[in-house]
Image: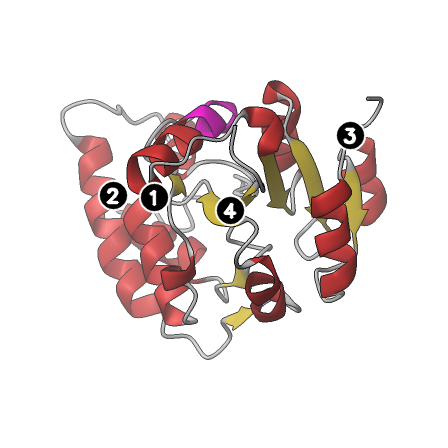
Amino acid sequence: MVSGKLILFDIDGTLMDAGGAGGRSLTDAFYELFSIKDAFKNIRFDGKTDLRIFKEGLKYHKLTDGNGVIASIREQYLSRLRLEINTDKKHIKPGIAALIEGLRGKNRIGLLTGNLRVGAEIKLLSVGLWQHFEGGAFGDAHEDRNRLLPIAVEDFYKNTGVRFSFSQCVIIGDTPKDVDVGKAHGAFTIAVATGPYTSPELADAGADAVLNDLSDTNAVLALIDGGTIAGN
């Protein structure tokens, strides 16, 4: 068993705010492909994989997901995202740069996100963060977010030759769905209230630790170093 831990970050609401680029891109994609305006105005995105969001949009508007439709949505969405991500409203969340620097050496850093892999790259490149992550799991690997932790661990092993157990993983995210992934596999979860959910809501979801943000690097590192699953 390796020393240190595998820290897996969510992207939207946790590492960065894309300034609404993802939502605009998907809305534009549905209009381009199906002539539907504001296709996702009644569908929440937070914590879901992109693949699941695509399918929910199709189901809501009574459209089939067969015959290459998902691939077409993916292509159109990513094409739009490459343009929309240039918004001046995008920004890195508080404390992220210092935290990444503080994690170097002892721990390894990866991603566990609902974004498509290419979408994650587009977003993180736009704020200069992509190069810090050695592996992970993305929203095109499986539509069920709870299936992503085993995929992330395996991907990290393929990329680095280092294999982590689930109990050596720390998931950092801003939604109850991030917490659910950790609870499903016995990983430690740190929920951060920098997205659409409040600290009490994240605590109610069962997070092992809840922070208002990640700006206190020493506090976050202490949680990661000493974190144990609630109740253990």
Residue at (35%, 67%) from the top-left corner? Answer: 84
Query: Counting residues from the N terminus, which is met first, the one under dot 4 or under dot 2?
Result: 4
Residue 17 within the magenta-colored segment of the rendering: no
- Residue 213 lies, with reference to residue 29, above or below; the image says below
Residue at (52%, 39%) from the top-left corner? Answer: 43
- Residue 64 lies, with reference to residue 140, above or below; the image says above
- Mark 4 in CB contact with mark 3 (< 8 angstroms): no
Q: Which residue is mark 4?
A: 41
Q: Is residue 114 left or right of residue 155?
A: right
Quadrant the C terminus occupies:
top right
Real-space Cα separation, disc 3 to disc 1, in angstroms: 26 Å
Real-space Cα separation, disc 2 to disc 3, in angstroms: 33 Å
Residue type for callout 3: Gly
Q: Which mark is residue 116?
A: 1
Q: Which residue is mark 3?
A: 206
Q: Is residue 226 left or right of residue 111?
A: right
Residue range in magenta is 145-150
Query: Counting residues from the N terminus, which is met first, the one under dot 2 or under dot 1?
Result: 2
Foreground mark, 4 or 1? Answer: 1
Q: Magenta segment, principal secondary structure?
A: helix
Real-space Cα separation, disc 4 to disc 1, in angstroms: 21 Å
Residue type for callout 2: Arg
Query: Counting residues from the N terminus, which is met first, the one under dot 3 or under dot 1?
Result: 1
Query: Counting residues from the N terminus, which is met first, the one under dot 2 or under dot 3?
Result: 2
Residue 101: image quadrant is: bottom right
Sort mark 1 into few (<14), some (14-19) or many (20+) by Cα contacts within 10 Å.
many
- Mark 4 in CB contact with mark 2 (< 8 angstroms): no
Residue at (20%, 32%) from the top-left corner? Answer: 69
| Local SS, label 2 | helix
